[in-house]
Image (tube, rainbow, N blue to C red):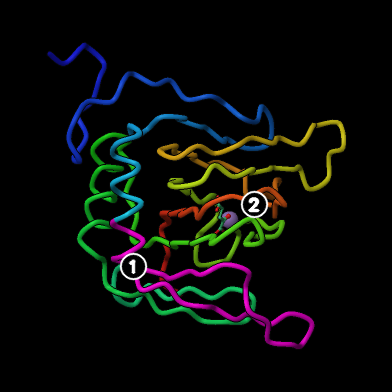
Amino acid sequence: MVEPGTQSSLFGGESAPDQPEQLIREDGDVRLYRHWWSEEVATELFARLKEELAWQQSHIRMHGKVVAVPRLDIWYGDPGRRYRYSGVQFDPEPWTPTLKAINGELKAREGLTFNSVLANLYRNGQDSVAWHSDDEPELGRNPVIASLSLGAERRFSLRHKTRRDLSPVRLDLPAGSLLIMAGTTQHHWQHQLGKTARAVGPRINLTFRTVFER
Ligand SMILES: O=C(O)CCC(=O)C(=O)O
Ligand SMILES: [Mn+2]
């Protein structure tokens, strides 16, 4: 029987009622659902996405040089939703069945709609993403970004850009978690996924976004 307040997942089974944790109190809105998917669903999705997505090595321009980013990634989305960062333009691949289903589940369970997703594959502890804000102009003024984690647990951090009285936030993102960044978060805060010397397995992160046409 489905308990009041539980929601059924497109991938089968029911998820327990799960109140989000508020990770920051000022200058933005960051919420974490630690167990948005069950362990079983998270394990199944990790395996499927690792196979299904066309992982590739991206390069960006930094200090006039072209450098490989320390991870594999790939953009999917509605046609024409071009995205540009660090001097490089990305054209989206058409949605895969699994990504489309997850996008539908975000709509059904959270009421959130997106037209694109950036998928990142961190192969080991040396793969990472440096401090940044998701503040490209094509994301609009106060973007809502839904970030899903699968595979190995990795340390995610947030720091305020100017206020030293607000402590940085550090947390390990478990497989099956959903982090939502909204409001003015990208104006005031930066985030990163640091490297680790620990032996860790691969991790997949999906950030669903709305890209507006230029
Ligand atoms: O992997 C993560 O948790 C964060 C990825 C990220 O911030 C990005 O791709 O913009
Ligand atoms: Mn980001």
The amino acid on which the numbered mark 1 sits, given as a three-letter code, is: Leu
Which mark identifies residue 193?
A: 2
The amino acid on which the numbered mark 2 sits, given as a three-letter code, is: Leu
Q: Position of residue 22 (x, y in %)?
A: 57, 26
Is residue 153 visible in the rendered image? The answer is yes
Q: Compared with residue 194, is residue 214 higher up or lower down, i.e. above or below?
A: below
**Ligand 1 has an atom within 8 Å of the beta carbon of the residue at disc 2:** yes
Residue 64 in the magenta stretch? The answer is yes
The region drawn magenta spans: 48-76
Q: Compared with residue 192, is residue 5 higher up or lower down, i.e. above or below?
A: above
Q: Compared with residue 18, is residue 142 higher up or lower down, i.e. above or below?
A: below
Q: CA distance from mark 2 to mark 1?
A: 21 Å
Residue at numbered disc 1: 53
Q: Residue at x 64, y 60 (%)?
A: 129
Q: Which image quarter has ligand 1? A: bottom right
Q: Position of residue 157 (x, y in %)?
A: 68, 43
Q: Secondary structure at mark 2?
A: strand
Q: Position of residue 181 (x, y in %)?
A: 53, 42
